[in-house]
């Protein structure tokens, strides 16, 4: 059995202020650093064998904090970056609705057809992320793998792995510093089971 821990990075100031981040490289806030430490404590009881992280600062710093507790190195990967939102990055949702009303409608109602000039499509995001994760799982069969990534990326990956329609994207949340766990049977790496989704119990007293 291979166990995959999917972790979203801690909070940033842009998260706090409701700004779209995408590929923009934002640091963790002081709150995000605290969340990452609580996340690390939550994972102390888990036998993590390897840690991968998006190379964006907010994810990599979260991974580093966890790695300090686990005494484990962090392997960076550009393939598990957040989706690129192009011209939306740095804007709040109300600004996007005002400036890109039709694109925003498609994004919310029909994400499979979301095509914004300068942005990545959900199909491209899903393809690159899924390939990266299956490659990582194949390389570390029988291990407990920790991946620190981003909200939209983790959602898209879970939807792809479970064979769900991309319209399910708006049906669940992936919060900052959350943990989701998938188990892959060693005889069928393409049919994992979701053990846990968006666990943030470790943040309850923050």
Image (cartoon, helix red, strand yellow):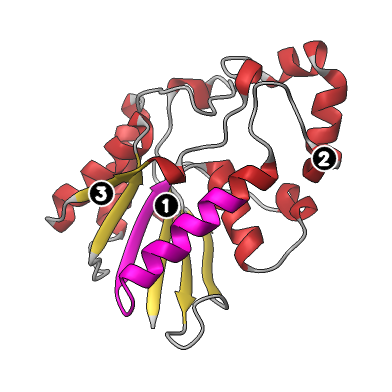
Left or right side of 156 for 12: left
Asked if residue 20 is positioned above or below residue 144 in the image, the reply reads: above
Estimate the x, y position of residue 94 in percent, counting from the top left.
74, 16
Give the labeled residue for mark 1.
7
Viewer-side label of 3, 1:
3
Task: Say whether disc 3 or disc 1 marks the residue closer to the N-terminus.
Answer: 1
In which quadrant will I find the C terminus? top left
Decide which of 61, 22 is in the foreground and name it: 22
The magenta segment: 127-149
Q: Are marks 3 and 2 in contact (CB under 8 Å)?
A: no
Is 39 magenta? The answer is no
Taking the spot 49% from the left edge, 77% from the top edge, the residue there is 189
Give the labeled residue for mark 2.
113
- Secondary structure, mark 3, is strand
Left or right side of 160 for 188: left
Give the labeled residue for mark 3.
75
């Amino acid at each position: 059995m291979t166990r995959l821990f999917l972790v979203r990075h801690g909070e940033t100031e842009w998260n706090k202020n409701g700004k779209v981040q995408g590929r923009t490289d934002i640091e963790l806030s002081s709150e995000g650093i605290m969340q990452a430490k609580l996340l690390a404590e939550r994972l102390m009881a888990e036998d993590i064998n390897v840690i991968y992280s998006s190379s964006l600062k907010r994810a990599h710093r979260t991974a580093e904090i966890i790695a300090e507790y686990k005494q484990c190195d962090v392997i960076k990967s550009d393939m598990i970056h957040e989706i690129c939102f192009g011209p939306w990055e740095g804007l709040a949702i109300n600004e996007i609705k005002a400036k890109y009303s039709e694109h925003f409608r498609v994004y919310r109602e029909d994400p499979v057809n979301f095509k914004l000039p300068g942005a990545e499509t959900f199909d491209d995001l899903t393809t690159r992320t899924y390939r990266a994760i299956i490659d990582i799982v194949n390389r570390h069969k029988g291990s407990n793998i920790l991946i620190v990534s981003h909200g939209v990326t983790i959602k898209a990956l879970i939807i792809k792995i479970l064979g769900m329609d991309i319209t399910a994207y708006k049906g669940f949340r992936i919060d900052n510093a959350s943990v989701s766990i998938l188990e892959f049977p060693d005889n069928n790496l393409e049919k994992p089971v979701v053990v846990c989704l968006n666990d943030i119990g470790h943040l309850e007293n923050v």
